[in-house]
């Protein structure tokens, strides 16, 4: 789920898109190249995660909204529940920060943008077209794989408009760690994307899609700017994450 500040940013960005796509194909071509230089993260596409090592440090088991997962440290922490109980932010004494989110709309980020009335972006339905029928995992993958180079400015106009719109959303909606890299992962019962390389970024976002159709977001950062997660620590969180309730029970818990 997107925070309020991100929603405002997307709305503003969408107005920019409307202006851009009304111009001729050469305008789209120039705009995408300018954005690529201004926002290098737009050129990032996910690589297959190669490191599946798992930290075995003493940890802490956590449970929220019908899911459980471990973090590989056991210091004390404070927690704050936000947004009608669908966000919980944890700040650990050792410096780590973890925000656990179950998006209200489980049908996908693009679907959420269209169906959230507060955003007033229902007209995006025509631009997204068949993307609306894709799974939440596929929608996120399509967004991550959109780059300035993938947009054919001189091809079919509808495809160019879609590409520019996706590129704008990618620039605004994805985490600040994107410029450092992105990865796709496959684990038993779940798959997803890691936005951010922990070797280069202090912020890493985990987008997890389980086999039951659930979508979970886990934002990993630090409270003092000095902490960086290791890949094995992130993998500890990913591998331990599991639902403790049935899909029907999860729906009730997350209301």
Image (cartoon, grey):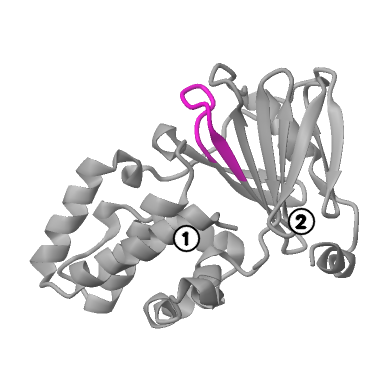
Q: Would you place residue 70 above or below residue 29 in this image?
A: above
The x, y position of residue 251, in whole percent, is 82, 68
Q: Residues within 10 Å of mark 2 (few under 14, many from 20)?
A: some
Q: Nearer the viewer, residue 91 or 186?
A: 91
The x, y position of residue 6, in whole percent, is 47, 54
Q: Would you place residue 191 above or below residue 104 in this image?
A: above
Among numbered discs 1 and 2, the one appearing first in the sequence: 1
The x, y position of residue 65, in whole percent, is 82, 54
| Residue 185 as seen in the image, left or right of residue 179 | right
| Residue 14 as seen in the image, left or right of residue 2 | left
Q: Residue at x 62, y 24 (%)?
A: 229
Regarding residue 53, the answer to whether it shows in the image is: yes
Q: Which residues are magenta?
A: 195-206
Q: Residues within 10 Å of mark 1 (few under 14, many from 20)?
A: some
Q: Nearer the viewer, residue 16 or 168?
A: 16
Residue ID for mark 2: 85
Q: Residue at x 22, y 64 (%)?
A: 152
Residue ID for mark 1: 7
* Most common SS among magenta residues: loop
| Residue 154 as seen in the image, left or right of residue 108 | left
Q: Is residue 197 magenta?
A: yes
């Amino acid at each position: 789920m997107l925070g309020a500040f991100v929603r405002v940013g997307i709305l503003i960005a969408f107005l920019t898109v409307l202006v851009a796509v009304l111009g001729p194909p050469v305008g789209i071509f120039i705009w995408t190249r300018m954005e690529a230089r201004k926002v290098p993260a737009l050129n990032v596409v996910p690589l297959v995660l190669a490191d599946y090592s798992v930290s075995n440090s003493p940890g802490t088991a956590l449970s929220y909204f019908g899911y459980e997962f471990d973090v590989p440290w056991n210091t004390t922490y404070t927690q704050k529940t936000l947004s009608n109980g669908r966000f919980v932010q944890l700040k650990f004494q050792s410096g780590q920060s973890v925000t656990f989110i179950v998006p209200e709309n489980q049908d996908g980020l693009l679907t959420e943008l269209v169906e959230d009335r507060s955003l007033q972006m229902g007209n995006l339905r025509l631009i997204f077209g068949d993307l609306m029928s894709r799974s939440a995992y596929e929608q996120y993958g399509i967004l991550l794989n959109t780059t300035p180079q993938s947009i054919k400015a001189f091809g079919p106009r509808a495809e160019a408009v879609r590409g520019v719109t996706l590129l704008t959303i990618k620039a605004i909606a994805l985490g600040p760690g994107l410029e450092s890299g992105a990865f796709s992962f496959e684990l038993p019962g779940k798959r997803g994307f890691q936005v951010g390389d922990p070797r280069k970024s202090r912020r890493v976002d985990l987008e997890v899609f389980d086999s039951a159709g659930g979508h979970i977001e886990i934002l990993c950062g630090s409270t003092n700017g000095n902490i960086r997660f290791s890949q094995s620590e992130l993998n500890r969180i990913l591998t331990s994450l599991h639902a403790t309730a049935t899909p029907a029970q999860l729906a009730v818990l997350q209301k």
